[in-house]
Image (tube, grey):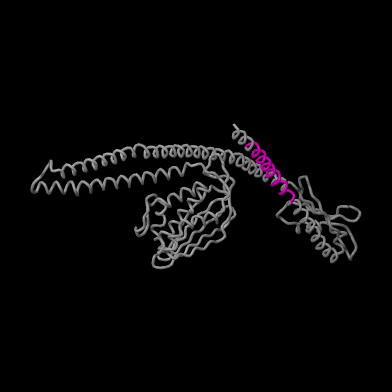
Amino acid sequence: MHDDSNNTNLIRITTRIAATVAAAVTLTMPLGYFAVSYQYMVGSLETASEVSAYNISKVISANPELWRYETVRLDELLVRRQPTCRAETRRIIDNQGNLVAESANSLTPPIVKRSYPLKDAGADVGKIEISRSLNPILLRTALVSFLGFVLGMTVFITLRVLPKRAINELKRTEEKLHRYARELKESNEDLKNFAYIVSHDLRAPLVNIKGFAGELSAGLKELEVIKESGVCRFEGNDGERVDKILGTEVPEALDFINSSVNRMDALINSILKLSRLGHRELKPEPVDVKELVATILKTLTHQLEQHSAEVVLGALPELVADRTSLEQIMGNLLDNAVKYFDPQRPGRLEICTESGVDEVVFHLRDNGRGISKDDIQKVFEIFRRAGKQDVQGDGMGLAYVKTLVRRLGGRIWCKSELGIGTTFSFAIPKSDRLPGNERGDFAL
């Protein structure tokens, strides 16, 4: 209801604006055209009367009798000097106000007049008056008014329709976003159900397998005791075969079953841990990042000494964040860097930050083995590892880091060059809310 009220107010406001703009266009076009055309006509009349007065004064000066006795010739002179492109009337009037000569054109009111004095030997002997009708301008102004009305209505309809279309488009977009949100929520529920299935339905068979493997081991030991007691004997090839089965093949199979179950159990635990990271409530608190990093580095002292590694700490900020998430992010990245130092040269590790307008960017640079370009994106996927597999790991560390950074509303990326080193960077926004908390806990 609130959105509908806002939309109604928006349509009402845009309608008023559209009406105002349309009225302005409808009125401004004809008024502007008339004003310009009228000024042009007045200026043209003044210029024409001045030029005509000058020319006729020269004729009168050269023919004094023409002024007094030959008005017919003056009429012809006026007609001959009148432009043919427009209708106008020209008159010569003496100082007493008497009409001396006139062109034959008749004009339809309203009429605009302009005059200029006639001189003979420097003295005013009369004036020439030129008149033109405003009708042509008025007719063209009417046409411009019609065009202005059409344009104004077009503007009104356009400004009236566009907001409605925009609102309808926004509504459709909002509906899509709500649908996507529902689908995302359903997907999250599916992931929760998947985690439940992993923790129960998949783990239960593993427990059974491990239990039965234990029963087989116990049974195997009893068979060994019976065999050693001599109660049951096998001679010749059968004896050798039984010894091989009981002494080698069955124990090896049981060891394989146990190791596979343990591996599968570890993978399940990794998936469950990743799932829990996405649902754990974030608890913001003041964090001294330099102290946090120093604490993590103390736990890696032995590994750093093995690689004769140099650690460079830049200016690390104090901020309000979820300590556990930040500690796990830094811990995984630092542990990853130390694991993959190049054994052929002393290690170097640098941790620094950049503070942007709306985010803090952390950089962790090492001079380790490096990652090929084809593997850079893969390292953030679950159970994926890059390069030589001579270091213990399950391929989940960077997947954990990516999940945690995203929960904080940030992003993570990697730049690397084989044989040179790797830089992992992640950015956390400076905001008053932790994006991963629906209740809006405070963050960076």
Does residue 3 lie above or below 318 as drawn?
above
Residue drawn at x 43%, y 43% is 275
Tell me, yes or no, whether the highlighted magenta stretch contains residue 13: yes
Quarter of the figure with residue 26: top right
Closer to the camera in the image, 293 or 370? 293
**Outermost residue, left side:** 236
Quarter of the figure with residue 300: bottom left
The main secondary structure of the magenta stretch is helix
**In the figure, is residue 88 to the left or right of 394?**
right
Closer to the camera in the image, 231 or 16? 231
In what quadrant of the picture does the N terminus appear? top right
Quarter of the figure with residue 161: top right
**In the figure, is residue 232 to the left or right of 197?**
left
Closer to the camera in the image, 142 or 122? 142
**Residue 355 place in picture, x, y as percent:** 58, 56
Residues rendered magenta in the picture? 11-35
Tell me, yes or no, whether the highlighted magenta stretch contains residue 282: no
**Residue 251 place in picture, x, y as percent:** 22, 47
**Outermost residue, top side:** 1
**In the figure, is residue 395 to the left or right of 216?**
right
Does residue 385 lie above or below 235 as drawn?
below
Residue drawn at x 8%, y 48% is 236
Closer to the camera in the image, 157 or 9? 9
**Residue 194 place in picture, x, y as percent:** 39, 39
Does residue 102 lie above or below 438 as drawn?
below
Number of dots carrying numbers: 0
**Outermost residue, bottom side:** 345
Residue drawn at x 53%, y 51% is 428
